[in-house]
């Protein structure tokens, strides 16, 4: 790795570590004995938010994976999609599949809750 590449990789590694700490805090909050259905639904909605506006965790992750897919499109050999297509698919799964399942779970836990 070149020095610049190594520095970029180190930044990514540090950022992933920070994200893992934040996710651990969310997991700890989800595991609290006093979390009820409406509160859990609100947390799930916060993780998802609106898929058109990267405000929640899943949309932000999808945006990150999409950025990787776009870069892969530019550098993959023969521009054959061997790298970029799976990345675009993963981004779609995050928003279309995982995100929708979070919405269903939140609606089940708190049918009257406002999805904001």
Image (tube, helix red, strand yellow):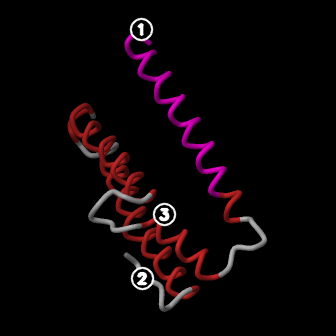
- Camera-side mark, 1 or 2: 2
Pointer 3: residues within 10 angstroms few (<14), some, or many (20+)? some
Mark 1–mark 2 contact, CB under 8 Å? no
87 and 108: which is toward the camera: 108
SS for tag 2? Answer: loop
Separation (CA) of disc 3 from disc 1: 36 Å
Mark 3–mark 2 contact, CB under 8 Å? no
Give percent across and percent down for residue 20.
60, 43
SS for tag 3? Answer: helix
SS for tag 1? Answer: helix
Separation (CA) of disc 3 from disc 2: 14 Å
- Camera-side mark, 3 or 1: 3
What are the residue bounds of the magenta stretch?
A: 1-26
Whichever of callouts 3 and 1 sits on the residue coming sooner in the sequence is: 1
| Point 50% across, 85% down: residue | 107
Pointer 1: residues within 10 angstroms few (<14), some, or many (20+)? few
28 and 61: which is toward the camera: 28
Query: Seen from this angle, which residue lies furthest right?
Result: 33
Give percent across and percent down for residue 91.
37, 56
Give percent across and percent down for residue 7.
44, 16
Residue annotated with mark 1: 3
Q: Is residue 68 left or right of residue 100?
A: left
Residue annotated with mark 3: 47
Pointer 2: residues within 10 angstroms few (<14), some, or many (20+)? few
Above or below for 39 versus 95 = below
Report the disc number at residue 114.
2
Magenta stretch, overall SS: helix
């Amino acid at each position: 790795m070149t020095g610049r590449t190594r520095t970029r990789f180190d930044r990514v590694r540090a950022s992933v570590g920070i994200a893992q700490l934040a996710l651990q805090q969310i997991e700890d909050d989800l595991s609290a004995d006093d979390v009820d259905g409406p509160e859990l639904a609100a947390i799930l909605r916060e993780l998802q938010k609106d898929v058109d506006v990267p405000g929640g965790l899943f949309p932000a992750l999808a945006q990150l994976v999409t950025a990787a897919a776009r870069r892969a499109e530019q550098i993959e050999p023969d521009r054959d999609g061997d790298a970029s297509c799976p990345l675009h698919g993963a981004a779609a799964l995050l928003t279309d599949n995982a995100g929708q399942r979070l919405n269903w779970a939140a609606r089940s836990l708190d049918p009257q809750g406002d999805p904001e």
